[in-house]
C-alpha cells in the first residue's frame, strides 16, 4: 500500500490536484483501478495537509447479475459514503442501438452520467482511476486510430458542469495495482460487458507487451516522452 499511496501523493502534489475543502467523487466501476484509487485516497485523508471529503459513485449499467453489495460493505469499512445510480446504458448500447463498436459511446454516456451524479451530490471534483499504463496506451490509441498525438490531462476543468477531473494514479503502474488488489482482496466486481477484452485498447496493451520483451523499460521511456511533450503544449498535464 505504501508504494501506491506514495506515488499517488506525488501526483497530487505535482499537479495540485486537491485543495482544502474539496468534495471528491471517486468513480467506482468495481474494477481494480477505481477500487485501488478509492483505497489510496481514503488512506491519504489522514496524511495530506489538504482537508477533503470523499464519496464513492457507481453507475449501475443495467447488466443482469451484477451486485454492488460487496463494494458497499467495503466503503462502509473504510469510511466513505457510497452512492449508486441505476442506468440503462447497457440496454441503449447493446439492445436498442446494437453498436458494433460500443466503447466510445459507452464511455461518453458514462462520463456524462457520472459528472451529473457528482454535481447532484455536491462534489466539485471527480477522481478517475487512470494509471501509468493508461497514459501510454491512450497515447498510442490516439496515434494509431485518430492520427494525432494526444493524451488525457492530469487535471481537467469542465466548465459545462463546473467539475474538475483529476487522475491521482498517473504514476502508479498497473502491475502494482494488480498486486495490491490480490494481496488485499479488494471486492472487485466482474465486468459483464461483452466487449471486455475485445477492444482496441486491449490490442495496444498486447502490442506494448510484445515490444517490451526486446525493449526493456519501453513504457517508462514512452511515459516520460508523453509527459514532457504535453507539458510543453499543455500546462494542465
Image (spheres, helix red, strand yellow):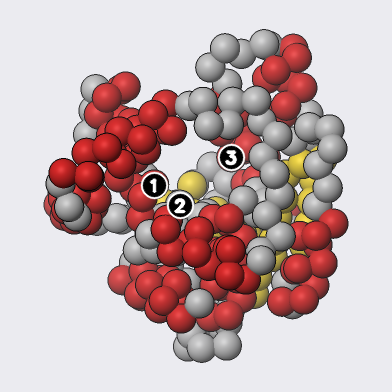
The answer to whether residue 107 is left or right of residue 226 is right
Q: Residue at x 66, y 64 (%)?
A: 186
Q: Quadrant of the C terminus?
A: bottom left
Q: Residue at x 22, y 45 (%)?
A: 212
Tell me if label 2 and label 1 are in contact, CB under 8 Å.
Answer: yes
The circle on residue 111 is 3
Under circle 3, the secondary element is helix
Instruction: Please identify the quarter of the rendering in which residue 38 is found.
Output: bottom right
Of labels 3 and 1, earlier in sequence is 3
Tell me if label 3 and label 1 are in contact, CB under 8 Å.
Answer: no
Of labels 2 and 3, earlier in sequence is 3
- Placement of 59 over or under 103, stated as above or below: below
Question: How many residues crowd mark 1 within 10 Å: few (<14), some (14–19), many (20+)?
Answer: many
29 or 204, nearer to the observer: 204
How far apart marks 2 and 3 lie (CA) works out to 14 Å
How far apart marks 3 and 1 lie (CA) works out to 17 Å
The circle on residue 134 is 1
Instruction: Please identify the quarter of the rendering in which residue 34 is found.
Output: bottom right
Question: How many residues crowd mark 2 within 10 Å: few (<14), some (14–19), many (20+)?
Answer: many
Instruction: Please name which of the two marks, 2 or 3, marks the residue nearer to the observer.
Output: 2
- Placement of 165 over or under 151, stated as above or below: below
Which residue position is annotated with label 2? Answer: 130
Residue 83 position within the rendered picture, expressed as x and y whole percent measured from the top left: 78, 57
Residue 43 position within the rendered picture, expressed as x and y whole percent measured from the top left: 58, 80
How far apart marks 2 and 1 lie (CA) works out to 6 Å
Under circle 1, the secondary element is helix
The circle on residue 97 is none
- The answer to whether residue 222 is visible is no
Under circle 2, the secondary element is loop
121 or 132, nearer to the observer: 132
Instruction: Please name which of the two marks, 3 or 1, marks the residue nearer to the observer.
Output: 1
How many marks the image carries: the answer is: 3
Amino acid at each position: 500500500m505504501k508504494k501506491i499511496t506514495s506515488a499517488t501523493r506525488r501526483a497530487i502534489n505535482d499537479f495540485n490536484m486537491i485543495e482544502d475543502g474539496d468534495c471528491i467523487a471517486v468513480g467506482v466501476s468495481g474494477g481494480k483501478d477505481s477500487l485501488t484509487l478509492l483505497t489510496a485516497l481514503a488512506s491519504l485523508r489522514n496524511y495530506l495537509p489538504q482537508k477533503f471529503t470523499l464519496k464513492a459513485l457507481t453507475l449501475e449499467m443495467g447488466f443482469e447479475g451484477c451486485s454492488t453489495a460487496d463494494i458497499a460493505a467495503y466503503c462502509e469499512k473504510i469510511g466513505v459514503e457510497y452512492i449508486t445510480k441505476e442506468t440503462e446504458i447497457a440496454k441503449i448500447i447493446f439492445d436498442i442501438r446494437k453498436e458494433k463498436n460500443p466503447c466510445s459511446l459507452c464511455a461518453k454516456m458514462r462520463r456524462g452520467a457520472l459528472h451529473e451524479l457528482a454535481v447532484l451530490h455536491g462534489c466539485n471534483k471527480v477522481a478517475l482511476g487512470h494509471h501509468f499504463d493508461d497514459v501510454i496506451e491512450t497515447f498510442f490509441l490516439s496515434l494509431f486510430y485518430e492520427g494525432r498525438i494526444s493524451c488525457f490531462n492530469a487535471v481537467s476543468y469542465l466548465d459545462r458542469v463546473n467539475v474538475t477531473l483529476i487522475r491521482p494514479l498517473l504514476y502508479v503502474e498497473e502491475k502494482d495495482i494488480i498486486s495490491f488488489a490480490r494481496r488485499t482482496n479488494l471486492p472487485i466486481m466482474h465486468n459483464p460487458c461483452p466487449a471486455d477484452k475485445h477492444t482496441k485498447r486491449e490490442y495496444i496493451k498486447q502490442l506494448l507487451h510484445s515490444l517490451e520483451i526486446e525493449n526493456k523499460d519501453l513504457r517508462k521511456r514512452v511515459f516520460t516522452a508523453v509527459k514532457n511533450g504535453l507539458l510543453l503544449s499543455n500546462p494542465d498535464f
